[in-house]
Image: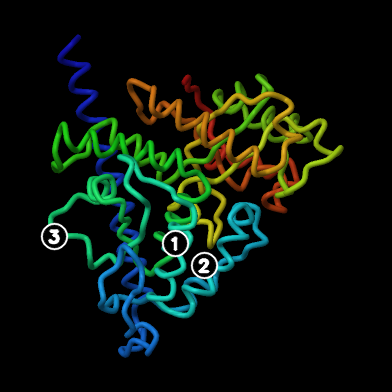
Amino acid sequence: MDVARRTRRRQHHRRAAARWRVDRLEARLSDARASVGTAAAVNGAEKNAVNDAGATACAPRRSLPAGHFADIDWTRPWFAQHGARGRRWQQAALAGYAPYLRELNADARASGQRTGRGQPLGFIAQDELPEGAAYEAHIAATGRVPTRHNLHDFFNALAWFAYPRIKATLNARQATAIDTLGVGPTRGGLRDALTLFDENAVLFACSDATLAAALRGFDWRTLFVAGRAKWEAAFDEAPGAAHREVRAEVRVFGHALLEKLIAPYAACTAHAWIIDVPEAYFSWPRAQRDAHLDEAVSAELAAAPALSGRSFAPLPVLGIPGWWPPNDNPAFYDDATVFRPGRRAR
């Protein structure tokens, strides 16, 4: 039995590692496709020194077409949560790589945020990551986040400001795992789970046990149709009386998930982390909700002795009420290739 269990565990780890490698390959291919046709010359602004605490006095060498950033539709509910800061960063990114890094670092200095081991947060060009250095270990040791001029890293940087404690906890646990196990051909179960959270998680805040059980149990009709009136879909900075019946909301955390949602598709599925919240939560302003989620989830992640894919519940993002007009029709949820039956416990 022990041999069989170890064999299954190794197979699970190999599958998770393969999925991660495919995701990273797709991201690199996306970057390569986006780079085709880019002007060879870097504009004059990018030739200036990058004037911040984390960057060297040389222009970043890599730039992507402006259209990549122009494709963000801030009216979408999954982007709206980042709109205030994201619109300003978007304009900097459209101006060039160096102005973009300057904008990120100005916000980092103003926030006083820190990474997994207490280092002041900053952002550097990808080229400045020392050869052979592990990405997460470098961030933990130096506070500097290697950042490319693309949407993937744009959304990653936004997550550092939206949920700084969660990001710092993920970074600390990744760095500790690297210290213990080193960097090998596979990440191992814990690092795979941390990466799933970082790249593809949503935070499912819920005060209704029936809805939480429906999500865990793949009961899509209860979750999305019978329970439809209990969902908060629109991003509202100042909730009011209309929120009295609301019992659930989703906040997108994963930066790879946000990148995928530039071009939404029906089967786009997140890894949902379920957080029990009090009913009063849905009457709080957004800033208070964000702070509560940041503190609660970071504490859970820090304390969890073991994490795996089963720590999450799959959630088809376009099924969220109010997020995608076609799901107003209950028949939208009849597609069993997206809303699959199954059973999972966390």
Q: Disc 2 and disc 3: Cα gap in Å?
A: 28 Å
Where on the picture, by quarter, is residue 19? top left
Q: Amino acid at mark 1?
A: Phe
Query: Looking at the image, which is closer to me, 35 or 293?
Result: 293
Residue that mark 2 sits on: 89
Q: Amino acid at mark 3?
A: Glu
Q: Is residue 165 left or right of residue 265?
A: left
Earlier in the chain: of badge 2 and badge 3, it is 2
Report helix, strand or loop for mark 1. Answer: helix
Q: Amino acid at mark 2?
A: Trp
Is the C-beta separation of discs 2 and 1 under 8 Å? yes
Q: Residues within 10 Å of mark 1 (few under 14, many from 20)?
A: many
Residue 12, given in percent of the width and then of the height, sits at: 27, 30
Quadrant placement of the N terminus: top left
Q: Disc 2 and disc 1: Cα gap in Å?
A: 8 Å
Q: Is residue 341 left or right of residue 38?
A: right
Report helix, strand or loop for mark 3. Answer: loop
Labels 2, 1: front one: 2
Query: Looking at the image, which is closer to me, 73 or 174?
Result: 174
Residue 20, given in percent of the width and then of the height, sits at: 30, 46
Q: Residues within 10 Å of mark 3 (few under 14, many from 20)?
A: few
Q: Residue at x 40, y 43 (%)?
A: 198
Q: Residue at x 47, y 41 (%)?
A: 201
**In the image, residue 342 above or below residue 319:** above
Residue that mark 3 sits on: 131
Q: Residue at x 38, y 69 (%)?
A: 149
Where on the picture, by quarter, is residue 197? top left
Residue that mark 1 sits on: 154
